Amino acid sequence: MEKNIKVLVVDDSAIVRKVFTEELSKERGIEVVGTAPDPYVARDKILKLKPDVITLDIEMPRMDGITFLRKLMKYYPIPVIIVSSLTQQGSKLALEALAIGALEVISKPSAAYSVGDMSLQLADKIRAVATVKVGIGQKKEEPAGIKEKPSLHALSETTNKIIAIGASTGGTEALKVVLMDMPLNSPGILVVQHMPAKFTTSFAERLDTLCEMTVKEAEDGDSVVNGKVLIAPGNYHMLLKRSGARYYVQVKNGPLVHHQRPSVDVLFKSVADYAGVNAVGVILTGMGADGAAGLLKMRQAGARTIAQDEKSCVVFGMPKEAIKIGAVEDVVSLNEVARSAISSIQKIKA
């Protein structure tokens, strides 16, 4: 008989602690072994209860969640899921937490957010991160000084080429690595990262400060052009469209796909339809199977396809599923993804 995943809920809100405990207790294989209103109580309960996963609020009294997380990653690394408000400040702190070592982020339940959907999503994330060895496959520091970059020369003629990237658990840091390695004149890049609404705005702004390419959260009708990365906004699907020679994105609502909105499959299938052989698809670390069927459709349409290897993934779920159904042409380590994508672009006939 499989052991239950032991969860500790750390949040200063008694209501949130109660809701999380009640809802997660209904989920198969998950046991809430304790709750804590602040990091000091949490520290004692971690040592006593030895949880497998912690859900952590980041705006708390006595010690903020970021400070606590830094200490936790240093002295007692454990899978952490951040629970954050939908405020601009909350989203920025959540991104900082992901950079420090947290594995996932979820928005706090509110009047506008279904507790039922939240609990299902949180349970899925708990199951995904429970066995992760924290720190494996994660690159924490921005590189100092001048980085070695892929050759720019062969990218001078890249008009009407597309790179589409999908990621989930562990993807915020993986995407940082990939996009920082992309030269300024790379083809237009479309990204779906599973992330709640509001958080993608701060995510895009952070990447824009780190990357040579311009990075922004996608808006409906945005053109896909060389040197620009468009991040799908949380809670909206992003699709590639074409008008004559012009590529642009459609940002729209719609049903969840693989329990996700935005969905990698939705993006990849649209890229297969509208870019075909002129595209490269990349699937990075993440739980579940989102993106596998879409990447297969891209490959069948003549696109080049790449998956991140198991060793460098935080969670190998999405790449594994894509590889299993024959959707992947090349499997490479995280640090080789950008180079491989550029090499694939070079092989596309103008």
Image (cartoon, rainbow, N blue to C red):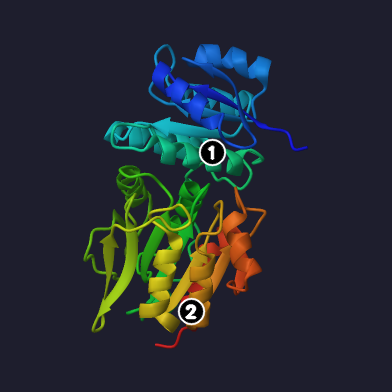
Identify the residue at image location x=49%, y=47%.
173
Q: Position of residue 8 (x, y in %)?
A: 57, 24
| Residue 340 visible to an observer of this rendering | no
Q: Position of residue 94 (x, y in %)?
A: 40, 35
Please give the residue where the numbered disc 2 appears in the rendered image.
303
Q: Quadrant of residue 330?
A: bottom right
The answer to which of marks 2 and 1 sits earlier in the sequence is 1
Identify the residue at image location x=47%, y=45%.
142
Identify the residue at image location x=43%, y=69%.
268
| Residue 193 visible to an observer of this rendering | yes
Q: Point out the image quarter for the N terminus.
A: top right
> Which amino acid type is shown beneath numbered disc 2?
Ala
How far apart in space, not on screen, are marks 2 and 1 (Cα)?
35 Å
Q: Point out the image quarter for the C terminus.
A: bottom left
Please tell me whether residue 186 is drawn above or below residue 316 in the rendered image.
Answer: below
Which residue of the protein is positioned furthest toward the right in this rendering? 1
